[in-house]
Amino acid sequence: MPDKPRLPWYRPRNITLAIVLLIVGLLAFVVIRALTARPGSAIDYASQLNELARTNQPGDITAPNRWDEFIAILNDYKAIEEQCDMRGTNSVGERLDFTFAYDTGTVDASAAPIVRADAIACLEAIRASDIYDRLDTFIVPGPAYFEAPPRTFLIMLLYPNLGDSRRLTQACIAEFHIAIDENRPDDALRAFRHTMSLARIASHQPLLIGYLLGNAELNLALRAAHEQALNNALTPDLARSLLEIVNGVSLVGPALGVGGEQTWMLDLIQRLHTDDGDGNGMFLLSEFRKMDFGTGMNTGVSTHPLVNSAGLFFPDKKTTTAKVLNFYEMLLDQAAMTPYARRNQTNLDQYVETSLGSRDILLRMVLPAIGSIIHQQDAFELQLDLTRIILALTIYRAEHGGYPDSLEALAPGYLAELPSDGFAPDGKYRYIKRKPTADDPREFILYSVGADFTDDAGKFVDNRDALRYNQSPMDFVLNPPATPSEPTPD
């Protein structure tokens, strides 16, 4: 009997079974991979952050790290503030504010004596302590930085007490104003140096929060100096001393903070992806969900490892890392430019919107807040420049009985060279000498052309808006005209 012909293996039934088995196998692989996936932690980014901080400290970086001493000062300050009796201030619906010690224009006239008395009482308590004596030891630059414990998850890293640093800075600013009012120039100078020390320490921490806080504290000091200069309250000697201090200020720039943020971001990427041992890995949606970030994006997404199956549909670790490094490189490149030179560069906020896909959920969440650092740096540099100029004008006026006809008269006699306005096409700050009038007693107008890059003859609208990219005609005016509600300079 002849053999029955064998049917081909690829007949429909077998092909169907093979496809089913393949699908089941793939699903099993995906499920097992999802359930067994573990986040990477091979690189100790905390130690890298510490080394970044150490090598970028001012002064002798081999000197001992004095962070613990600094924190002890802040803790003692906080204890004093907590002991201050603020019942009077609280009774009128206000909170302790050291500006009330020298300016109560923001509160009702009936409340002014109450809030001023409480602020001064708290300042006296600080004076009675040794806090200012200990701050004296930080005037000379040296290492003072927070060290993260090895292998710390950097997203959990908090800088203890930096909020108290800002409060102590405000107390020092109050001491500066009060000392000038009471004709105590040495005490005013000491308070100004304390403020500069606090700002320097904060800005040399290796995350952007420290950079921003330090420059905000520096800005408080610069504003206090030029306010007193515009009020004609500075003696020539005090103005010279302040100018010497301000000339010695070198803005840290965002490189340290950005470098720290990049390290922070790489640590985050590491802990949200698996590690294949070759620098790559799968996105772990369950780990991302656990972090939440306070955005509400966790709605409907489980923390069960099974959701990691969806990681195949998100960019892998190498892709995400490359995008992050590219973003930070662009950020530092643009930070090194003047605002005018940067005017045609890709806006980093727009880059996030146009160059990141909908699946780049981590980067779209974290990166937008970082791009704005450049504009804040521009504002800090502008305030520093204009404070130098206003102090030089103050000294010139004291020596010559009036202000110069142009800023060129200040260099090199009072300034080694005139600061350059990064917003101006020609790099020059603007200065208009004028005759005071009853409506506008200013003897000059000192200004930057602002973010429209156009000289609008010192037109003042809003200084914050003047430094934003806009088309409205306005300048950044250091000494804007007084409004009816504001006292005019003496």
Image (cartoon, rainbow, N blue to C red):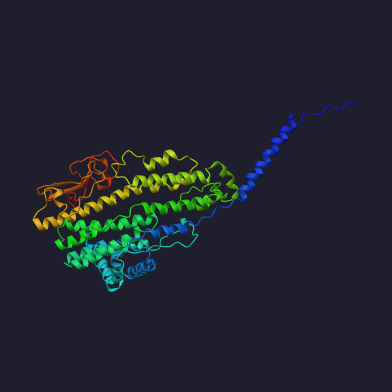
Q: Quadrant of residue 128 in the image?
A: bottom left
Q: 303 or 372, which is in the foreground?
A: 372
Q: Residue at x 74, y 32 (%)?
A: 13
Q: Tell me if I can see residue 490 in this picture.
A: no
**Could you say where residue 302 lies in the image, as x and y percent from the top left?**
56, 49
Q: Is residue 144 left or right of residue 249?
A: right
Q: Quadrant of residue 473 in the image?
A: top left
- State the quadrant of the N terminus: top right
Q: Residue at x 44, y 46 (%)?
A: 325
**Could you say where residue 149 lies in the image, as x and y percent from the top left?**
47, 63
**Could you say where residue 405 lies in the image, as x and y percent from the top left?**
11, 48
Number of numbered discs: 0
**Could you say where residue 470 lies in the image, as x and y percent from the top left?**
28, 40
The residue furthest right is 1
Q: Is residue 426 left or right of residue 52?
A: left
Q: 231 or 408, which is in the foreground?
A: 408
Q: Is residue 228 above or below residue 66?
A: above
- State the quadrant of the C terminus: bottom left
The residue furthest left is 401
Q: Is residue 223 left or right of residue 321?
A: left
Q: Tell me if I can see residue 326 in this picture.
A: yes
Q: Is residue 100 left or right of residue 261?
A: left
